[in-house]
Image (cartoon, rainbow, N blue to C red):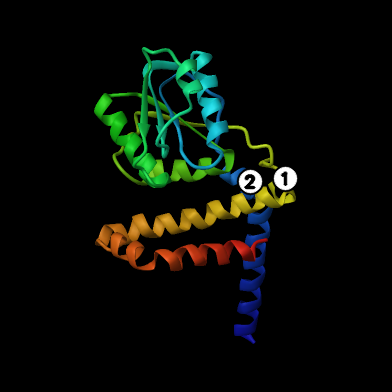
């Protein structure tokens, strides 16, 4: 009887956690802020890169960039209109070799350290912001004196309060959870024991398939 009672209590607690997460995940993922003056603007690759680029240019034109660099990650080239929108004195850096959010964060941290910068704004969609913050806090050099913030690019499907009412927004949110757990395992565990490359090289197809299967269960 004690076992069944404990099992029931555990089941209720687990259901409560899922219930809470389902209705509050949008707010948990959202750590975006209003733009303030910054030394560096970073437009992340992936996602809706057009909207991210538009937001980066918007912040630049409004005068938020206090120094001379904007970094675009995960792209090989930029539309000519981007160059026309930005003063030639501004340093435009294209970091095309980074492959994912973790590598983007580590690359930016290294750039900030080498150039003695004191603040940075990352630009991405709202639900992506929490993952960037966690990676920023846990991995790479300790840059506690650097002012970090994420400014949201436009994502019409997203509302942090009611994300679960839109199927695409819900999939985006759950995808962020899956990617976060995966990256914490790969970079927080496997990379520390020297097995990251072996794991990714040998199980790349299986990893992609499992991610798809997990996301399908939430639809």
Identify the secondary structure beneath mark 1: loop
- Crowding near pointer 1: few (<14 within 10 Å), some, many (20+)? some
Of the 4 image quadrants, the one containing the C terminus is bottom right
Q: What residue do we see at 50% from left, 25% from top?
A: 56
Q: What residue do we see at 36% from left, 44% from top?
A: 103
Residue 64 at least partly seen: no
Specify whether 206 is left or right of 5. Answer: left
Determine whether 167 is above or below 39 in the image.
below
The residue indicated by pointer 2 is: 26
Identify the secondary structure beneath mark 2: helix
Q: Position of residue 5 (x, y in %)?
A: 65, 80
Q: Position of residue 141 (x, y in %)?
A: 29, 39
Specify whether 170 is left or right of 83. Answer: right
Q: Position of residue 134 (x, y in %)?
A: 44, 45
Q: Which residue is at the front of the view, 30 or 60?
A: 60
The residue indicated by pointer 1 is: 162
Q: Hey, which quadrant is residue 197 in on the image?
A: bottom left
Q: CA distance from mark 2 to mark 1?
A: 7 Å
Whether tag 2 and tag 1 are in contact, CB under 8 A, the answer is: yes
Q: Hey, which quadrant is residue 189 in on the image?
A: bottom left
Q: Which residue is at the front of the view, 70 or 1?
A: 70
Dot 2 or dot 1: first in sequence order is 2
């Amino acid at each position: 009887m004690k076992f069944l009672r404990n099992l029931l209590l555990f089941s209720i607690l687990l259901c409560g956690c899922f219930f809470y997460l389902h209705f509050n995940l949008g707010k948990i993922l959202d750590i975006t802020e209003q733009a303030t003056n910054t030394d560096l603007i970073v437009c992340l690759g992936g996602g809706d890169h057009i909207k991210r680029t538009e937001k980066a240019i918007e912040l630049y034109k409004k005068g938020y960039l206090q120094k001379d660099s904007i970094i675009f990650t995960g792209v090989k080239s930029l539309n000519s209109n981007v160059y026309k929108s930005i003063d030639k004195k501004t340093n435009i850096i294209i970091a095309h070799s980074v492959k994912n959010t973790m590598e983007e964060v580590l690359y930016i941290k290294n750039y900030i350290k080498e150039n003695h910068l004191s603040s940075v704004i990352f630009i991405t969609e709202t639900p992506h912001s929490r993952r960037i913050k966690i990676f920023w806090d846990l991995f790479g050099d300790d840059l506690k004196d650097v002012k970090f913030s994420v400014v949201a690019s436009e994502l019409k499907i997203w509302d942090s309060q009611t994300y679960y009412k839109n199927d695409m927004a819900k999939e985006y949110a759950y995808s962020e959870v899956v990617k976060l757990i995966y990256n914490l395992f790969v970079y927080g565990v496997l990379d520390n024991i020297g097995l990251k490359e072996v794991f990714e090289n040998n199980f790349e197809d299986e990893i992609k398939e499992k991610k798809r299967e997990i996301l399908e269960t939430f639809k």
